[in-house]
């Protein structure tokens, strides 16, 4: 084969791979493993919109809400029925890693999917209804100390999940000896948990700042603690941290995506690249600032390693507090 012919063949291969990666993302789809209104739903919808606005995808991202099992229904759907889909990404977070660490997705492990990239970290919050008499985190924890049965905390993750763990971390830091006495009620997503708070069925809410923001803006809830080492900037600067109230509790929920385990390398690399370009954009920095997301810039293998380390760390914490043996 001549040099020119070789170059032509290589160019044709490169062009075909590029075309394959592009065609693989026709009719792009993002699964949010919860009902509308929660953090996973926010991740899918905001990233999908931003990708299109930046011209990184040329079609509207279809968002599918697939609630159930704290994300387990969606995980099983991807592993068992959508394993070779090249146009599919799935919203994930520390809650996903927590459930995988605790074996909450029966028969499933993190190695059955491909981890794409992070898009930021979302600090945890503890909130109450806007008309609640409780104004501070110590007030809420004092009520739990005095009578654990009098206070129920709602969250969008399963019992033993990340939302649950954040409350237990705060309770432990405050000196509540048996954190298992804290009453936690699980719902499929932060939206449902806040609805129960507003209905008076529970007295507190544990979630992340991005999913709480809309309910704060509407005047429905008030944040009594952000689980960040120091106050966030901008419009979130009015929210007190747990630390400044004497409760040394920090909880950051990373947000990102996984893809089917059988996704082609070409499509995987294309998605990693697109999400990386999104993260680097000024437009995404504005989204992060507006929604209280802290920086966390991980893609591809680096993100895969990060998730693996997270799962191992959460397994250790869960054993310490008796959630798993």
Image (cartoon, grey):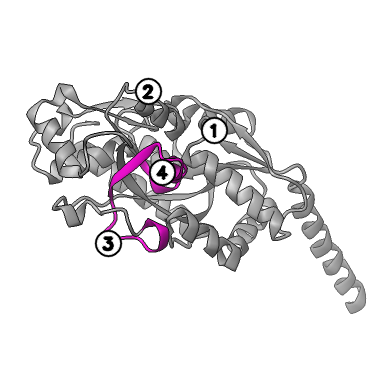
Q: Which residue is mark 4?
A: 216
Residue at point 39%, 48% (across, down): 209
C-alpha gap between disc 2 and disc 1: 18 Å
Q: Which residue is mark 2?
A: 199
Sequence-first disc among 4 and 3 = 4
Nearest to the eye among marks 1 and 4: give it: 4
* Crowd band around label 1 with a 10 angstrom C-alpha radius: few (<14), some (14–19), many (20+): many
Instruction: Say the numbered circle drawn on residue 230.
Output: 3
Q: Which residue is mark 1?
A: 36
Q: Position of residue 57 (x, y in %)?
A: 73, 54
* Crowd band around label 4 with a 10 angstrom C-alpha radius: few (<14), some (14–19), many (20+): some
Residue at point 60%, 57% (across, down): 275
SS class of the residue under badge 1?
A: loop
Q: Which residues are magenta?
A: 207-236
The quarter of the image holding the C terminus is top left
Sequence-first disc among 1 and 3 = 1
SS class of the residue under badge 3?
A: loop
Sequence-first disc among 1 and 4 = 1
Residue at point 92%, 72% (across, down): 5
C-alpha gap between disc 1 and disc 3: 30 Å
Identify whether 3 is placed above or below 241. Answer: below
Camera-nearest residue between 173 and 23: 173
Identify whether 35 is placed above or below 218. Answer: above
Sequence-first disc among 4 and 2 = 2
Sequence-first disc among 2 and 3 = 2
C-alpha gap between disc 4 and disc 2: 16 Å
C-alpha gap between disc 4 and disc 3: 20 Å
Say which quarter of the image contains residue 66. top right
* Crowd band around label 2 with a 10 angstrom C-alpha radius: few (<14), some (14–19), many (20+): few
Nearest to the eye among marks 2 and 1: give it: 2
């Amino acid at each position: 084969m001549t040099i020119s012919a070789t170059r032509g063949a290589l160019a044709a291969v490169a062009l075909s791979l590029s075309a394959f990666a592009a065609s693989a993302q026709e009719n792009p789809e993002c699964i949010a493993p919860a009902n509308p209104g929660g953090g996973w739903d926010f991740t899918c919808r905001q990233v999908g919109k931003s990708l299109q606005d930046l011209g990184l995808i040329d079609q509207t991202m279809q968002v599918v809400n697939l609630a159930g099992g704290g994300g387990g229904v969606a995980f099983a759907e991807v592993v068992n029925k959508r394993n070779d889909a090249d146009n599919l990404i799935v919203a994930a977070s520390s809650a996903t890693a927590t459930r995988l660490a605790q074996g909450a997705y029966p028969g499933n492990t993190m190695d059955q999917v491909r981890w794409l990239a992070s898009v930021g970290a979302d600090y945890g919050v503890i909130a109450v209804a806007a008309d609640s008499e409780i104004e501070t985190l110590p007030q809420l924890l004092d009520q739990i100390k005095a009578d654990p049965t009098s206070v129920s905390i709602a969250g969008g993750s399963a019992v033993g999940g990340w939302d649950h763990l954040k409350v237990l971390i705060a309770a432990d830091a405050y000196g509540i000896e048996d954190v298992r006495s804290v009453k936690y009620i699980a719902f499929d997503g932060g939206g449902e948990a806040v609805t129960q708070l507003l209905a008076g069925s529970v007295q507190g809410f544990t979630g992340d700042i991005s999913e709480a923001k809309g309910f704060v803006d509407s005047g429905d809830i008030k944040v009594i603690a952000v689980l960040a080492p120091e106050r966030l900037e901008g419009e979130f600067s009015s929210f007190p941290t747990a630390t400044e109230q004497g409760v040394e509790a920090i909880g950051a929920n990373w947000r990102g995506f996984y893809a089917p385990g059988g996704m082609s390398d070409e499509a995987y690399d294309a998605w990693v690249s697109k999400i990386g370009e999104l993260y680097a954009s000024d437009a995404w920095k504005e989204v992060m600032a507006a929604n209280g997301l802290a920086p966390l810039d991980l893609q591809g293998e680096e993100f895969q390693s990060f998730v693996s380390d997270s799962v191992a760390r959460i397994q250790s914490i869960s054993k310490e507090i008796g959630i798993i043996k």
